[in-house]
Image (cartoon, grey):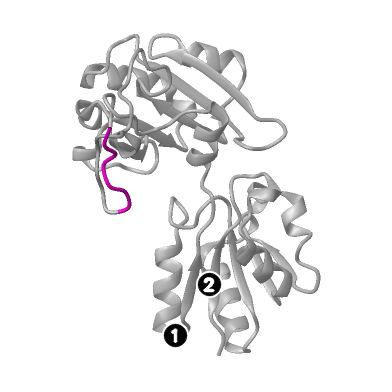
Amino acid sequence: MSNVFFVGCGPGDPELITVKAKKLIQKADVVVYSGSLIPEPILKLCKKGKLHDAAKLVREEIFDLLYKNAKKDKLVVRLHDGDPAIYGAIREQIDNLEKKGIESTVVPGVTSFLASAAALGTQLTLPGVTQTMIITRAEARTKVPKREQISELAKHQATLIFYLSVHLLNKISKEAIEGGYKKTTPVAVVYRASRKDQKIIIGTLTDIASKVKAEKITMTAIVIIGDVIKPKSYEYSKLYDKTFTHGFRKAKTK
């Protein structure tokens, strides 16, 4: 029996797919992909395999496709946008396959918050500002543990990154301020990061919701809150400081 490959295809730009992912798609006998989130040029890499749109299927149907084809020793790819490990629902699929004796392999991909940082030309961990990123989603139909409420996470004053939440920006802004962020804290919203129709909206916690509403953006966007978006000041990294020693370089002397 064959493995099932859970493959991340990146944030949208077809050139940001990994070499390994590209080879697997080209060789695949069966590809179950995440609907319209997968760019057409990437689907076209599948020359000989049969494509199945997971957006039109329920959990049991997806599992059945993966299991039955793997059992026939076919090369099966479950194709996810971005990286499969982030809001990809792969744990349940892997566990169910394992119960049936099918092994799985995960192939990482460039996730959209990294593509968003690249679009912004910014650094998400900045010395003197923050060394921490928190990746989360706002609560809606999918519940969030109390300890992970936005107002609780905001207490860390870290770079706060939201998936699947741009339609809840009013709620996010309100709770972030309640948790301790200043009203003037910069916020960036990147719509369809890395794609040709990418949009970047910059604001603060007080005006970002209205700016995004004016652009009619309600989905497929990353929200990033934090001073790293527009830092007033920061420290230089010690890594390349002439007085800082580490295992790969001795301190320079005058």
What count of labels does the image hold? 2
The residues colored magenta run: 248-254
Split into 4 quadrants, where in the image is the C terminus?
Answer: top left
Whether residue 249 is in magenta: the answer is yes
Query: Residue 165 location in percent, x, y?
Result: 45, 33
- Toward the viewer: 108 or 43? 108
Whether residue 100 is in magenta: the answer is no
Query: Residue 78 location in percent, x, y?
Result: 58, 66
Q: Specify the principal SS of the magenta part.
A: loop
Residue at the spot of label 2: 63
What secondary structure is found at the residue carrying circle 2? helix
Q: Residue at x 39, y 73 (%)?
A: 95
Between the C-alphas of marks 2 and 1, the distance is 11 Å
Q: Residue at x 58, y 52 (%)?
A: 81
Q: Amino acid at mark 2?
A: Phe
In the image, farthest residue toward the front: 254
Query: Residue 168 location in percent, x, y?
Result: 43, 26
Residue at the spot of label 1: 100
Split into 4 quadrants, where in the image is the N terminus?
Answer: bottom right
Query: Residue 75 location in percent, x, y?
Result: 64, 79
In the image, residue 108 above or below residue 230: below
What secondary structure is found at the residue carrying circle 1? loop
- Toward the viewer: 239 or 102? 239
Dot 2, how many residues are within 10 Å of its Cα: few (below 14), some (14-19), or many (20+)? some
Dot 1, how many residues are within 10 Å of its Cα: few (below 14), some (14-19), or many (20+)? few
Q: Amino acid at mark 1?
A: Lys
The tag earlier along the polypeptide, 2 or 1, is: 2
Q: Residue at x 47, y 22 (%)?
A: 188
In the image, residue 213 above or below residue 126: above
64 with respect to 98 (left or right): right
Q: Residue 129's image quarter?
A: top left
